[in-house]
Amino acid sequence: MPATSAVSGKTAMSTTTETAVAPRDGVALVLANADATATQLVDALVARLTGQGWQVVRAVPGREFAHAEPGVYQLRADRVEDIAALLVALGDRGPVMRVFHLGGLGPRIAPGTGDDAYFGLLALLQALEGAPASHGAEARPVVAVVADGLGDVSGCEALAPGKATLLGLAKVAGQEYPGLDCRVIDAPRVASAAAAVALAAALAAALVDEADRGRDFLVALRGAQRWVRRYRPVPADLPRHERLRRGGTYLITGGMGAVGLALARYLAGTWGARLVLLGRTPLPPRSDWPALAEAADQPATLRRTLRQLLDLEAAGAEVMTVVADVLVAAELQAALARAHARFGPVHGVVHAVVHPGRGLIGRRARADVEAAWASKIAGTDCVLRAVAGEPLDFVMLCSSVAALIGGLSRSDYAAANAGMDALAAARRRETGLPVVSVNWDAWRDVGVAVDLDLPGGVGLDEAGGVRAFERILLGPDLPQVVVSTTPLEARLGPLDQGLLAALEELPATTAATAVGQPRPVLPTPYVAPDGVLQEGLSAIWTEMLGIAPLGVDDSLFDLGGDSLLAIRLLSRVRKVYGVELHPADFFRAPTIARQADEIERRLLDEIEQTDPLGLTPDADGAMSGSPDSLSVAT
């Protein structure tokens, strides 16, 4: 780590003072769940909102959408069509300005089961996307996601890992829907209806005030205080707890992946470790590896994996490859039995299985989400149960910084990793397993980032990743660590400003795009640019993609572009035309024609309100490309 690196430590909680809230008109929607202890809170919340001048509508669980009584609708909370019908029914009452989503209150939810709270919030967001937009400076709806069991403020509170996925979805919602303010409120757990009666009025008042506060993404309400999560440096001289041993046996799930193999090389080369590399896809017979590793007709990924395994063996490493699905307990037990037979007991585990789960919230289906969750949440639970009897020095769960910072098109992934973090904390407390969840930054050219053209200084190279791995396992014993290559606090806002700044530094044309390529076969017919604006945008797209000619209805993603290229393209458009387009809006219709329409609309709006804009390019920013910090949360 460079000299400027720091280890940031325990989550700092601070209290803040309450402020008065001016009454407003508009619709406030309360989405209740079926939990009996939440009924009193719903009643108090409705009363509080009504007293502030809101038109309040309550939605309760039902078998189908229906208008049950004045101000009360019943619906299926996880069905987009039901919530969309409700929004249509409320259309003549004015804009929906407050939504209190209470699906996360109540009994604990089993991790990875696809709970109604998550899919209820997903359906709400998808319905809001399809609803007519509200306009005006004050028309920025607030969605308050209320749940319990998300955080342990006092140090003795029970956690509900199954609800932590809400954090990832809500974080990304605030990034993909720039006109929406989405926040999470961690409410105190209420054990009985009697306790709910005592707390309801005060908690309802705090929820309403919090929805109007407009500052912090995640807040925990406990009594008369509100607590917010902060990361702060931990002194470098904290007691060390070395958890690596020479000649130790280490199990790496996802062990044939690029990150798993990078860590395997370090463990074997530095510690003389014996390695059990577990993967779901069978490898060819060992005798065929040398030939297949050099065969041009084999997939590049397979050739690269085989070469790295052969290099490990040539360096003298003791390596066992095992095929097993982390979701199948019997296969995990069989893998451990093989490890015991060859190496003896396992001393450490790295759970490095990855599922990227990319896609805008508006296009996600239950099956997409559950696939992304499988290895990260349910698989983690299976692995922790399987290794519970081993003499373990550590269990490292490879989570992602996306759980904290979100990311466009990454709601499934952010949610899965937030669930993994919570599961790690809960199992560490319940079982005493030495679990640490590591929120890794992207590893350049490997793992989830393998297909992304990350700029220099963004993400970890292998050497930086290995140094962070070593530092975590030879440093203080902490339940959660964040590895960030840029200052973490700057990344916790609506969008990752460090990444955006780095992308703006890249030249428009790279070596890969300098050579002209013909337009590929696409699902849309070719339509030539029409007018100065479309021709100008076509020139920018051609310069960045290296493809010509381009049709105005061609999708950037069909042309081989990715989210990072899209952000670079928007940065270039901003510099040339002086118009700021939000990435999420562009992602929904990534074509030259739609981009031209939006730029024209924005420019006309500016002309109506002010003098014409001077089209002066912005100055490029600068940033350091070195890994910045490890950050720690408890």
Image (cartoon, rainbow, N blue to C red):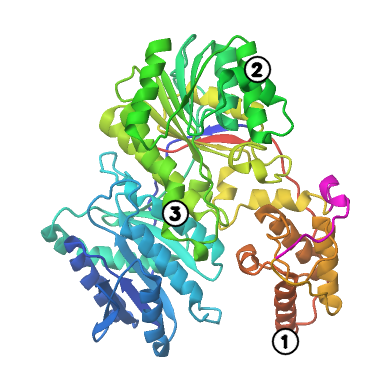
Considering depth in this image, is 228 or 224 the residue closer to the camera? Answer: 228
Tell me if mark 2 has few (under 14), some (14-19) or many (20+) residues whose alpha carbon lies within 10 angstroms of its own: few
N-term-proximal mark, 2 vs 1: 2
Please tell me whether residue 538 belongs to the stretch shown in magenta: no
As measured in the structure, the alpha-carbon distance from the residue carrying label 2 to the one carrying label 3 is 37 Å
| Residue 110 coordinates in the image, percent (x, y) | 28, 47
Placement of the C terminus among the 4 image quadrants: top left
Tell me if mark 1 has few (under 14), some (14-19) or many (20+) residues whose alpha carbon lies within 10 angstroms of its own: few
Q: Is residue 216 visible?
A: no
What amino acid type should be assigned to the residue bearing mark 2?
A: Asp
Please tell me whether residue 510 belongs to the stretch shown in magenta: yes
- Where disc 1 sits, the SS reads helix
| Residue 279 coordinates in the image, percent (x, y) | 49, 30
Query: Which range of residues does the magenta coloring cover?
Result: 509-522
The outermost residue toward the left is 194
Q: Disc 3 designates what residue?
A: 369
Placement of the N terminus among the 4 image quadrants: top right
Residue found 19% across the figure and 67% down from its top: 39
Tell me if mark 3 has few (under 14), some (14-19) or many (20+) residues whose alpha carbon lies within 10 angstroms of its own: many
The numbered disc on residue 608 is: 1
The numbered disc on residue 311 is: 2
Residue found 39% across the figure and 75% down from its top: 81
